[in-house]
Image (cartoon, helix red, strand yellow):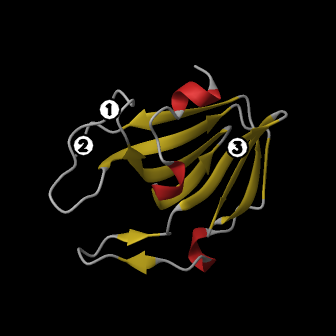
Amino acid sequence: MSFESELTGVMIDDCFVYGWRQVAEVLIFEIDASLWPGNPHHEKPRAGEWTCYKRAELVFSGVREVSGLLPMQIVRSNTDHDGTIDYDTIEGLTEIPGGFGIIGDFGDVTIMAERMQLEFSTQA
């Protein structure tokens, strides 16, 4: 899939980040994806939500280099009313030559990687 098709119906700057980790050549951001009509995973929003949110992982694979990503321990976190900790939202996500750029409270990150995909959790 292409970068654009992975993000069809996703409001990226309304996706909340719950954490990130890198294992070998894979970098994963755990998020609540903000989904809109046009995304195949979109459903009617739950009570109290202005759009459909679904747990997902933003997965970068074939990672050759990551720069600008801050350690989770030093990034300011927020505690939601239900006790969930998040690291605010993704401010931007772009495709660049040879990889991707992603910006948020976690840093102004450059990821030199082969591909990016959005994988949805089977949990609510």
In the rendered structure, the answer to whether residue 9 lies left or right of residue 72 reads: left
Mark 2 nearby-residue class (10 Å; few <14, some 14–19, many ≥20): few
> Which x, y percent locates residue 10?
46, 41
> Which x, y percent locates residue 96?
80, 38
Which secondary structure, mark 1? loop
Look at mark 1 in the image and give the residue it sits on: 41
In the rendered structure, the answer to whether residue 57 lies left or right of residue 55 reads: right
> Which x, y percent locates residue 34?
40, 49
Where is residue 91, by image quadrant? bottom right
Q: Amino acid at mark 1?
A: His
Look at mark 3 in the image and give the residue it sits on: 94
Which secondary structure, mark 3? strand
Mark 3 nearby-residue class (10 Å; few <14, some 14–19, many ≥20): few
CA gap, disc 2 to disc 3? 27 Å
Q: Amino acid at mark 2?
A: Gln
Q: Earlier in the sequence, mark 1 or mark 2?
A: 1
Tell which residue pokes out farthest to the left in this image: 47
